[in-house]
Amino acid sequence: MSDDELRTLTRALERRRGVQLCSYGNARGCDSLVDARHFARMVAANGGHAFDAAAVERARARVRRLFEATRSYDDGMRSYEARCDYERAFGEYVAHGDLVAALLLEGFRARFEPSDGIGCRLAARERLH
């Protein structure tokens, strides 16, 4: 993942500050994001990026094998469901934000709405094997 891609994703998340924050997990996996100041500290501690670049790259290499695009969001899935499918398929933890970043970078469409909480609706589904 290039620095430009990381900066773009971080800026996009910063614009939504307060919407994507939660009290039980975040894009780095082990800490909790409970307020905008904590988010700003986490980004600063991670070299100005909100995502784990290595984890996003691992996920990017796998998401095309696991998911396929759908015509509409109604035929798709929620991002949390995608994370559960990913972890089941590959036996490896992935932070929710890192997986969403990987899906977006691989061209999958996502719709973010306040009713989705910290997640989003994906125009994607798990491939049938």
Image (cartoon, rainbow, N blue to C red):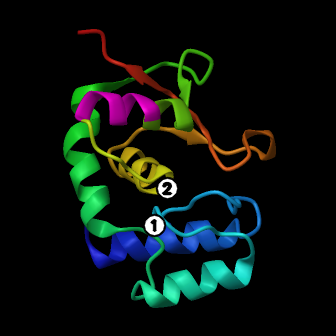
Q: Which of marks 2 and 1 is nearer the N terminus?
A: 1
* Residue denoted by label 1: 28
Question: What residue sits 72% from the left and 40% below the top?
Answer: 116
88 within the magenta span: yes
Vertical placement of residue 9 versus 89, above or below: below
What residue appears at the point 62 percent right and 78 percent down from the top-left corner?
39
Quadrant in which the N terminus appears:
bottom left
Looking at numbered disc 1 in the image, what kind of residue is underneath it? Arg
Which amino acid type is marked by label 2? Answer: Gly
Q: Mark 2 points at which residue?
A: 97
Q: Nearer the viewer, residue 90 or 117?
A: 90
The residue that appears at 63% across and 73% down in the rendered structure is 14
Which image quadrant is residue 57 in? bottom left
Q: Which residue lies furthest to the top in this view?
A: 129
Residue 23 against residue 63 in the figure, above or below: below
List x then y, in percent, for residue 79.
Answer: 54, 37
> Magenta span covers which residues?
84-90
Judge whether residue 60 is colored magenta: no
Secondary structure beneath label 1? loop
The residues bearing labels 2 and 1 have C-alpha atoms spaced at a distance of 8 Å
**Direction from residue 17 to residue 11 in the image, left or right:** left
Circles 2 and 1 in contact, beta carbons < 8 Å: yes
Task: Rate crowding at label 2 as few (under 14), some (14 to 19) or many (20 or more) other CA atoms within 10 Å.
Answer: many
Query: Where is residue 100 shown, x and y percent of the image?
Result: 46, 48
Q: In this view, does 25 lie to the left or right of 69?
A: right
Please tell me whether mark 2 or mark 1 is closer to you in this view.
1
Which of 5/59 is in front? 59
